Amino acid sequence: MDRNSLFLEPWKEIAAIHWNDWRWQFRHRLRGAARIDGFSGYNPLKRKALQGVSRAYPVSITPYYFSLIDRRDRNDPVLRQCFPDLREINFSLGGVDDPLEESSHMPVKGLIRRYIDRCLILTTTVCAVYCRHCNRKRLRKKSNKSMTVRPLMRPMLEYIGREKAIREVILSGGDPLTLSDQRLDAILKSLRAVRHVEVLRIGSRAPVVMPMRVTPELCETLRKYRPLWFNTQFNHPREITPEAARACEMLLEAGIPVSNQSVLLRGINDSYEVMRELLQGLQRISVRPYYLFHCDPVLGTDHFRVDIGKGLEIMEKLRHSVSGLCLPGYVVDMPGGKVKQPVHSPRMDDVEPCR
Ligand SMILES: *Cc1c(COP(=O)(O)O)cnc(C)c1O
Ligand code: SF4
């Protein structure tokens, strides 16, 4: 049977007014195994196993992101980023829950500080789409479900107020743009009230997985708190749709620079051609490629990991063929270490960089 016919077309008749409303998209996320059953087309045994995966690591896919999937392709790059995979619970493949030891870098719960001048706060544990390669997968485990972030906000703000060396705060999560405009406004306002906090940053995948979240009202809210930098995560050129481009443009028009942090993912973007198309596509929509992350050894993501040698080879080829404005820094988060390390080819190691 053609795989296409195995998928339901759940939103065929949806009016544009709903489709373009982020709250509709958010409410109609495909969640849990039951919904996947309806369109997976797998045999009952595999379906049952996938239910096991989605119990370990919940599934959530917005109708918009789902619509980008080419359903004839089992290895579709969008599908693979959001659809559960049996290898996620094959724990013999290695990895640990928290390879960056973020939990041990939390001076107060919910606030991660690995650098003296900047820190990261978890504003929510919810995302519109749960990326299967997420390096904070652990936050979604049942044992962590009890972690509600809201009561942590006051202690986090008090800590930031005390720590005069912190000049930049990154709103992360989870995805901060799953919060309401009012809630975001309140958080940003309290941070802006701290005199030594000069720069704010939001890390959000909303432009990629739910671009209708970027509304004129949101832009008006964010505009008030500049300098505010926005980091998103496009991993494949197919994600650069007119809707996503529009979302980035609206942020840019509000005076908010948009950068991109991709993750190097096996079978998704680990080729020179795909990566070049992605980076040049981002440059075309005025989004600056910032980092290319080497996939961290997070439990349940081994099937996404690319050999560092291959990553270097792709970067080396790109360096010779694309504009400098398209080139991200290829970095690896050092387990237990404090900083993101640039990855160099071995022969570059003996060259002292000029500073
Ligand atoms: C990545 C990260 C930052 C930001 O690092 P930049 O190199 O400035 O992008 C800050 N805090 C934590 C905990 C991080 O993981
Ligand atoms: S949007 Fe970010 S935090 Fe959320 S699942 Fe994806 S990678 Fe993880």
Image: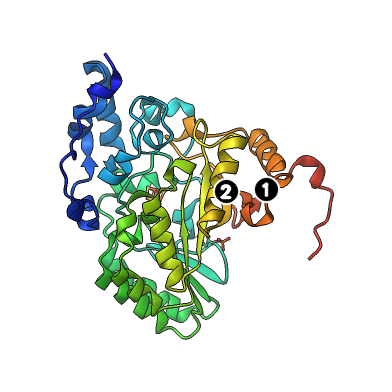
User: What's the residue type where badge 1 is placed?
Assistant: Val
Report how far apart the C-alphas of labels 1 and 2 lie in the structure: 9 Å
Q: Is mark 2 within 8 Å of ligand 1?
A: no
Is the residue marked by circle 2 packed among few (<14), some (14-19), or many (20+) residues within 10 Å?
many
- Reading the image, the residue beneath label 2 is 279
- Reading the image, the residue beneath label 1 is 322
Relative height, residue 34 to residue 348 (above, below):
above
Q: Position of residue 37 (x, y in %)?
A: 20, 27
Q: Residue at x 26, y 20 (%)?
A: 42
User: 196 or 285, which lies in front?
Assistant: 285
Q: Earlier in the sequence, mark 1 or mark 2?
A: 2
**Which secondary structure, mark 2?**
helix
Q: Residue at x 67, y 48 (%)?
A: 322
| Direction top: furthest residue | 1
Looking at the rendered image, the quarter that the C terminus falls into is bottom right
Q: Position of residue 265 (x, y in %)?
A: 51, 37
Please give left or right for residue 46 compared with residue 293 in the image. Answer: left
Asked if labels 2 and 1 touch by Cβ distance under 8 angstroms, the answer is yes
User: What's the residue type where badge 2 is placed?
Assistant: Leu
Please give left or right for residue 156 compared with residue 12 in the image. Answer: right
Q: Is residue 7 visible?
A: yes
**Which secondary structure, mark 1?**
loop
